[in-house]
Image (spheres, rainbow, N blue to C red):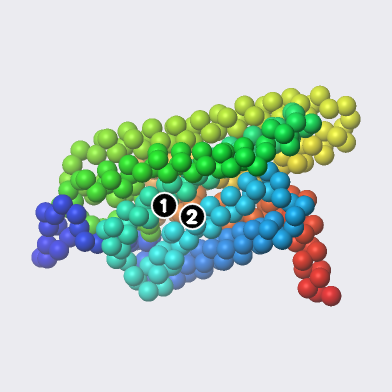
Amino acid sequence: MSDSNTTDVTNPSTFILLGFPGLEAAHVWISIPFCTMYAIAILGNFTILFIVKREPSLHGPMYYFLCMLAITDLVLSTSILPKTLSIFWFNSTEIDFSACLTQMYFIHCLSAMESGILVAMALDRYVAICHPLRHSTILTNSVLAKIGLAVVLRSGLLTLPYPFLARSWPYCTTNIIPQSYCEHIAVVKLACADIRVNSYYGLFVVFSVIGLDVIFIAVSYIQILWAILHLPTEDARVKTFGTCGSHLCVISAFYIPALFSFLTHRFGHNVPLHFHVLMANMYLLVPPMLNPIIDGVRTKGIRDRVLQLFTHKGT
């Protein structure tokens, strides 16, 4: 029997990504919805960027944050989908060790960045509704740049230890990852070492990023809801709440799949492996696909420009 996958080495030269373990025969069929989601994500997010860049009237805090979200979604989906589709279509399961660690870093960094952008969007909605007369003076371009820089630095620095921790362990059992991409815990589980530091640090990142962000968003929307309920007329309340609708949908599209993935990974020990893989993919693929659709339908400025774009093309 070959020892190619059981050699005592510090770092393997490659890892093997299985895609959906146990469903290899259905990989081509599974690739159809994955490819469709990726195509929608690319088209939708580029449309958001094009429209905001093209229309000076949309050069404001809310639309800048939407552009940040669109760029993050584009890079996040592109960091996993091409390799996943190559597994499905060409059985290209090998990934270089360094490439695996690079993918790991970008996945976790961009996920944390997306959560930070959602917090920034909640801050924008809070200021716009609770302090409307001071919105332009509070959220100046300088403040927006600082918020964007803080989101990027927080995400980049907090997730930076992931690849270094993963690289530090010896891998002497197998190089087969039962996943379609290099997720941190899935990789370090292959190490011949006590990986509790990885597990504890991963939990720290989850609670310090996702946990704190959810709390901040919840507090912001409690105050927003309180302000909306004290508006003088029902029409004003409905209109103002409608402006928050798209952001609430985007928040749900990101955090609900992420929560399901986290719960099934940590506590779903009896859940089939292919379901774990499905949830791990959904929480990275669903938001980039849904965000531009939600923004296009629910955000009036973008919806009107999209309709004008297609109306002019049709005439």
Residue 57 in sight here: yes
Location of residue 216 by image quarter? top right
Location of residue 261 by image quarter? top left
Q: Are marks 2 and 1 in contact (CB under 8 Å)?
A: yes
Horizontal and vertical percent for residue 205? 40, 36
Query: Please, what secondary structure does the residue beneath circle 2 have?
Result: helix
Residue at image coords 48%, 46%: 111
Q: Residues within 10 Å of mark 2 (few under 14, many from 20)?
A: many
Q: Is residue 165 above or below residue 20?
A: above
Task: Inspect the image, locate mark 2, and give the three-letter code of the amino acid beneath it.
Answer: Leu
Q: Identify residue for label 1.
A: 106
Q: Nearer the viewer, residue 186 or 33?
A: 186
Task: Please give left or right for residue 206 compared with residue 101 in the image.
Answer: right
Q: Of label 2 and label 1, which has the lower sequence position?
A: 2
Horizontal and vertical percent for residue 186? 32, 49
Counting labels gives: 2
Residue 282 in sight here: no
Horizontal and vertical percent for residue 278? 45, 54
Task: Please give left or right for residue 270 compared with residue 238 in the image.
Answer: left
The mark found on residue 76 in the picture is: 2
Q: Residues within 10 Å of mark 1 (few under 14, many from 20)?
A: many
Residue at image coords 51%, 63%: 34
Query: Please, what secondary structure does the residue beneath circle 1 have?
Result: helix
The mark found on residue 244 in the picture is: none
Give the spatial CA distance, label 2 vs label 1.
7 Å
Task: Inspect the image, locate mark 1, and give the three-letter code of the amino acid beneath it.
Answer: Phe
Q: Nearer the viewer, residue 292 or 281?
A: 292
> In which quadrant is the N terminus drawn?
bottom left
